[in-house]
Image (tube, rainbow, N blue to C red):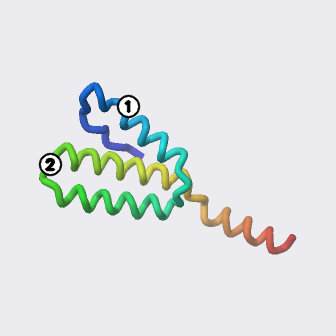
Amino acid sequence: METRPWPALNERARWLPEAIERELRESTQSAEELRVHARELRAEAEQTDLKGMRDAALALADRCEQAAAVRTPDKAAAASASAVDEIE
């Protein structure tokens, strides 16, 4: 999955994208919660005329989708594991 780059930041704010990405990795939000957040961010991006805000919202939305994809178990594997649990 290709992600948009973060918008250019001044020197004092360069730590922010790394911190946001770390928070997404360590977050306990479900895949669905992350997808909902990504949709909200994209909706916000459509409503703003500020290019930096739009670019940042879209970049974060991409990363939320990416994190959700990592968390989403294969539905067939999950169903199979559930069936095995029931048999045992």
| 34 to the left or right of 76 | left
Q: Nearer the viewer, residue 58 or 69?
A: 58
- The residue pinned by badge 1 equals 15
Identity of the residue drawn at 30% across and 32% down: 13
| Displayed quadrant of residue 35 | bottom left
The answer to the question of whether label 1 and label 2 lie on touching residues, with beta carbons closer than 8 A, is no
Disc 2 marks a residue whose amino acid type is Leu
Badge 2: residue crowd in 10 Å (few <14, some 14–19, many ≥20):
few
Q: Circle 1 — which element?
A: helix
In the picture, the quarter occupied by the C terminus is bottom right
**Number of marks in picture:** 2
| 83 to the left or right of 27 | right
Residue 62: where, in percent of width, then height? 37, 49
Residue 57: where, in percent of width, then height? 29, 50
Disc 1 marks a residue whose amino acid type is Trp
| Displayed quadrant of residue 21 | top left
- The residue pinned by badge 2 equals 50
